[in-house]
Amino acid sequence: MRPVRFGIVGLGNWGRVHADIYSSHPHSVLTAVCDFNEKRAAEFAAAYGLSKVYVDYNEMMRDPEIDAVDLCLPT
């Protein structure tokens, strides 16, 4: 079984918690991150060794290398 490739939208506290989980789970791969704050998104991606960084979730949703998207946004 191939790991599920995840993208996360929203990189606040919950985004970091979810990123840690996806990064450590054997059946998932954190693939991309998205946040409207470009600097935060770039720093977050660098901390997790990711090359896919988005500021527009629509663009991320079109990425064929992402299987699932986790929305970690405020209610």
Image (cartoon, helix red, strand yellow):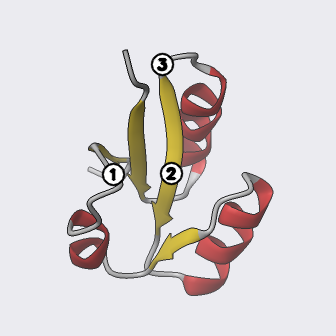
- Find disc 3 in the rendering and name its residue: 27
Task: Give residue 36's position: percent from left, percent from top.
Answer: 43, 80
Disc 1 on helix, strand or loop? loop
- Find disc 2 in the rendering and name its residue: 31
- Identify residue type, mark 3: His
**Residue closest to the far right:** 47
- Find disc 1 in the rendering and name its residue: 66
Residue at the spot x=58%, y=19% of the render?
Answer: 25
- Determine which quarter of the picture holds residue 10: bottom left
Task: Give residue 17's position: percent from left, percent from top.
Answer: 59, 35
- Determine which quarter of the picture holds residue 63: bottom left
Disc 2 on helix, strand or loop? strand
**Residue closest to the far front:** 1
Q: Earlier in the sequence, mark 3 or mark 1?
A: 3
Mark 3 to mark 2 CA distance (whole Å):
13 Å
Marks 3 & 2, CB-CB < 8 Å contact: no
Q: Earlier in the sequence, mark 2 or mark 1?
A: 2
- Identify residue type, mark 1: Ile
Disc 3 on helix, strand or loop? loop
